[in-house]
Image (spheres, rainbow, N blue to C red):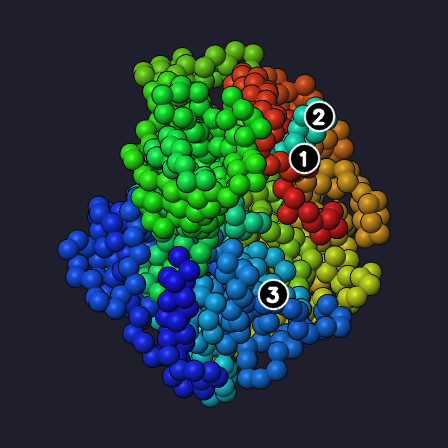
Amino acid sequence: MKHVSLLVLCFCMYIIAAAQETFPVNGVSDLRSDQFVFTNATIVKDAQTTLQNATLLIKRGKIVAVGANIAIPKDAVVIDCKGKYIYPSFIDIFSDYGIAAPKSSGGGDFFNYINSSPTKGAYGWNQSLKPETDASKIFAADNGKAGDLRSAGFGVVLTHQQDGIARGTGTLVTLTDERENFAMLKDKAAAFYSFNTGTSTQDYPNSLMGCIALLRQTYLDAQWYKTRPATEGTNLSLQAWDDNQNLPQIFDASDKWNDLRAVKIANEFGVQYIIKGGGNEYQRMDEMKASKASFILPVNFPLAIDIEDPNDARVVALSVMKHWEMAPLEPGMFEKANINFALTASGLKSTGDFLSNLRKAIDNGLSATKALEALTKTPAIMIGAYDKVGSLDAGKLANFIITSGPVFDEKTTFFQNWVQGKKYTLTESGWNDYRGNYKLTVKQNNQSTTYNVEVKGKPDDLSATLQTPGDSVKNDVKLSVNDKMVKMTWSLKADSSNLNRLTGLISNEKLWMGNGYSSAGNAISWNMQYVSTFIEKPDTPKKEEKKKDSVTAKVMYPFLGFGWTEAPKQEDMLIKNATVWTSEKEGILENTDVLLKGGKIAAIGKNLTAGNAKVIDGTGKHLTAGIIDEHSHIAVTGSVNECSQSVTAEVRVADVINPDDIQIYRQLAGGVTSAHILHGSCNTIGGQTQLIKMRWGKDAEEMKFANWDGFIKFALGENVKRSFGQSNNRFPDTRMGVEQVLMDAFTRARDYEKLGPNKRKDLELEALSEILEKKRFITCHSYVQSEINMLMHVADTFGFRVNTFTHILEGYKVADKMKAHGVAASTFSDWWAYKMEVQDAMAYNAAIMQKVGLIVAINSDDAEMARHLNQEAAKSIKYGNLSEIQALNMNTINPATMLHVADRVGSIKVGKDADVVLWSASPVSIYAKPEKTIVDGVVYFDIEKDKQMQQQIAAERNCLIQKMINAKKGGAKTTAATVTFDVINECEIDMQHNHSIWQQQ
């Protein structure tokens, strides 16, 4: 072995000299054309092709030939790989290897860089956009980290600086310990993106919806920049963005819903992203397949949680435990769905966990063939490098691993990882299999004694026994083999004092020889001749194989408590003999039937026939249209506020709908069938809103109310001026400043409309122009009468109408002016005195505005309040003497009207959507409970089904808790329990939905 190692060293010196000819040689130049031949191996050329007893010939760091009957050059070093396997080394195309962790540039006050980046040079305005970053210019080889990756079988990585929304380009490098020049295969191999602003010191964007808006705007700006507009000058960031579009595009989404958000952006701009997933994509496989994207899947499966203490167990959500259980299923599910994917070690705390986690995936459905393909050919093809790496074909780099057996077998040893033709020894233990039956001859004082020796155990952990011929007694031999060096010590059981110590060399597989000393101290010589192969005796007890921890659990939709394993289906239903609150001119109808068919209200009357419809007895019960919450902030991911600038009309709540929010189910349990999801009230002109239907278990796009007029959130008062902020440097600071922001914004929008067809498309001004063109409608956070009057004046000045004042707690003071303007009012029933500008609020507000002739709704602005909006509306029966139907209408037809969807929802009328609620009692009673909440003819909440689900949740929780406890007892790594759900209802808290009350109200 030592002479082979010397030749390898010489070979590597040659590579340095030959591959980097422009570098001066500091030493003796060695220009030999060394060649290596690996014979008698099982060679896996690629995932589909395996050659038995084959030969691999490499020269100058590249593969020359692979196969059988290959002529061996005379000057080649021959390495016998009998009993060993050779595989292409692995490729990871999502890495930060060799790239220093980014540091924040800038400094000072957090709000100093709102509109310009502190980055010096002719670059773009936003620091989170760094398309000009070139990983090849900052890459520095790191042999320590390279060694960790090589030990896991990797030979090539695509590395980039993981910082910002646009991260620039990544460089493809090998894991050699040579100079960067030699390691780098492709300087710009792919462009990278994310939804994370990284180390940017700028305030914008500070929300997920802001990140998405900035990405969309930058795509538009880059397209515009191609025309070389004189108004822009030189913008190196946009130039780099355009240049990078010719490369593979990799998006670090890291979550199932973010995956789909990225795909939506890609589709909008004609881009094909390779999506780096987050390991929870298995929860939405239909959507992943429909995306038609390729994926990079991590195998950083979650650790078991230490929940032996019941107090710890009760704070861990069912979804968290199920994710721990099911995450290893993901790669196999992608294979079954025929979705193209590569694998990555990204996200692992230790690269050493990569292979063990990958074996978990194989135990849970991923085939070994697909696993190998996802680590070799697939990533190479994704980044256009299959001509260089990814298989063992002639002409490609000599990047391969040599193992003791099938590469993913738990018992397999990785011996060597060759990178660009250079050997990196991972372990020498077990390289040679010396197991077998031998004849040992010991010579002492010219006398020879012969023994039979059996060498057994594992190739990397040998043991031996010794017998005197004709004697049945087996004597244990202490045996160690290090490279070719041998040490043996034994004593005969009949005479334990007769201790013999032998040392020597293995000259070849057939002959061992050396010297030693007997127990008497006499010198002895010895040799040991190979006789036959070691065969494990049939009666040798075998260790019981560890049971594979396979998973058979089902995915829930959504993936948390009260999710469906089988989604409810649309049904035809006949609700018989109920008290029907129509919210139409017919008012309340006693003992009436309602037929729901095809997701619509098909008939209303008495003694209707069912046909094939399911009959529901409504006797003693009350049927209403579904409650519509005009002002809600549920089901949002990544903050409800883009709080950075005074005007952020470009951001869209529609981009960040979170279908997994448990509040959807909770509000279905309160009779809510639709909710208007608003941007927060942090800025004067906030984001575009989204009306959703509570289609529990559907994805974000399916939840959206189709063909709906667009709305946008405005805000006035304390939340906007934020004069209480300790470091607030954002305009405005006063209420009169708020008015000026509005005047300026709409003046800019008017000027924008006058520009020609070749203008730069500005998403912010596009939204404001839609308001001027009466294509987008305003719902405005408001309290004080002076500001209410101010906004109506601004609207009159620019020729549009405010659609809705929300909160509007001083609306009773200006109801006549509001009626003249044509604005609706969405208010609280009895909130007041929670901050200075609501000191004049009162519980009679809703009734007064209603009686003046305004369309009035009662909203929640609060996830908990939305669960009993019927009771909130009923308060106006006491405070204002409204009728019961008038009160209910403030939850149904009135919000439907102000949201421009009264032709489809908000009342029980033939032809409208079958969005209805069956109550146990009058809906304005504090004792009423929704028994069934129906959306589009689908029962999304059923009080009896809910009881069953609670029992199922309890049982499944207990099962998973025990499984985690058993995992810990079995030696699995664990992590500490943290609060992840509401302990009352086994439901998640959205930790990102952490905006304060002042931002919402």
Residue contact between numbered discs 2 and 1, judged by CB atoms under 8 Å: yes
Secondary structure beneath label 2: loop
Between 245 and 268, the one lying in front of the other is 245
- Residue 64 visible (yes or no): yes
Residue 977, which numbered label? 1
User: Quarter of the image holding residue 550?
Assistant: top left
Q: Position of residue 776 (x, y in %)?
A: 51, 58
Per the model, the C-alpha gap separating discs 1 and 3 is 29 Å
Check disc 3 and report the residue beneath it: 101
Secondary structure beneath label 1: loop
Per the model, the C-alpha gap separating discs 3 and 2 is 38 Å
Between 646 and 340, the one lying in front of the other is 340
Mark 1 or mark 3, whichever is nearer to me: 3
- Residue 357 visible (yes or no): no
Q: Is residue 628 above or below residue 964?
A: below
Q: Is the residue marked by circle 1 packed among few (<14), some (14-19), or many (20+) residues within 10 Å?
A: some
Q: Position of residue 330 (x, y in %)?
A: 42, 40
Mark 2 / mark 1, whichever is N-terminal = 2
Mark 3 / mark 2, whichever is N-terminal = 3
Q: Is the residue marked by circle 2 packed among few (<14), some (14-19), or many (20+) residues within 10 Å?
A: few
Residue 309, which numbered label? 2
Mark 1 / mark 3, whichever is N-terminal = 3
Q: From the viewer's perspective, is 839 left or right of 572?
A: right
Q: Is the residue marked by circle 3 packed among few (<14), some (14-19), or many (20+) residues within 10 Å?
A: few
Per the model, the C-alpha gap separating discs 2 and 1 is 10 Å
Q: Quadrant of the N terminus?
A: bottom left
Q: Is residue 453 above or below residue 119?
A: above
- Residue type highlighted by circle 3: Ala
- Residue type highlighted by circle 2: Asp
